[in-house]
Image (cartoon, helix red, strand yellow):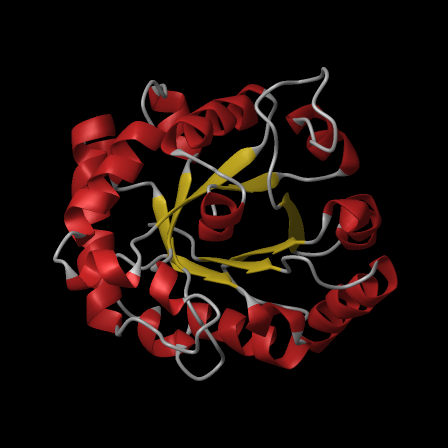
Amino acid sequence: MRIPMIAGNWKMNLTIGAGLELVKSIHYSHRHPGEVDVVVAPPFTAIHSIAEAVKDSYISVAAQNIHWETSGAFTGEISPVFAKDAGAEYVIIGHSERRQYFAETNETVNKKTKAAFAHGLTPIVCVGETLAEREAGRVEEVINTQVTQGLTGLSATNFEKLIIAYEPVWAIGTGKTATGQQAEDVHTFIRELLVKLAGPEIAQKIRILYGGSVNAKNAKELLSFPNIDGALVGGASLKAPDFVEIIKGATA
């Protein structure tokens, strides 16, 4: 039985003070979330403060990115050691915005995923196709390449802890959402790829989240599908009432 996960990616939003108010509001308005893992991913500047504030709550903290090296001449980058030291337990890797704007590749995703595991962070590895790729009938080709190259060389122990997020690029921040069946079809395909990479037993343990304009209205329907194990939430994670409704949708 895979425990659902609801992860909120704050992206480049919220000061430390605003972030603290948000997590307090989430916690105090929904004290008993049931069997669901709840994660927030604040900007790096707020990770330590947020992690301290939520350490006695059900909320965990993720970094939004890391570098694959532990230290060195990489101005402006954040080591996995620093993210862990600041209080992060998870890290988002390969988000489409990192791929689109900051030259993230399947190779760097692979390096960062391995670095995360090496330093005690659980990676949430993102994959997804663009609208042009979907319209060209290349969804499975794109996902196959991203998953296979991004996860190459992982150990069985790594695979057991891995989290994947399917985020169709055309549905991120656009208000467009894949239908539940569209998302389930791709999640099923990803699960089949994981069987090839890690074996059937481990593949059944890996959580696959859906990300792409998830909100309080569509979360329950999306999360009702058997291979959709949670959500990576963008804009709706910045509003406590909306985020709480999504959490409730995961436990319904």
Residue 228 relative to residue 15: left or right: left
Dividing the picture into quadrants, the one containing residue 12 is: bottom right
Q: Is residue 155 left or right of residue 54?
A: left
Q: Going 34% across and 18% down the picture, which residue do you hit? A: 153
Q: Is residue 248 above or below residue 126?
A: below
Give me the residue at 42% from left, 61% from top: 211
Seen from this angle, which residue lies furthest left?
A: 137
- Can you tell which quarter of the image residue 71 is in? top right
Question: Across the whole image, how many numbered discs are drawn on residues?
Answer: 0
**115 or 139, which is in the foreground?**
139
- Where is residue 86? Give x, y as percent: 78, 36
Q: Quadrant of the C terminus?
A: bottom left
- Where's residue 155, x and y in %? 36, 19
Residue 172: where, in percent of width, then height?
A: 44, 65
Quadrant housing residue 225: bottom left
In the image, residue 214 above or below residue 228: below
Above or below, comparing residue 114 to residue 221 in the picture: above
| Residue sitting farthest toward the top | 72
Q: Is residue 42 left or right of residue 222?
A: right
Q: Position of residue 38 (x, y in %)?
A: 58, 57
Q: Residue furthest right?
A: 17
Q: Could one spot residue 226 in this view of the protein?
A: no
In the displayed structure image, the side of residue 205 where residue 121 appears, left or right: right
Residue in front for this viewpoint, 56 or 216: 216
Tell me the residue at 26%/56% (across/down): 227
Asked if residue 185 shows in the view, the reply is yes
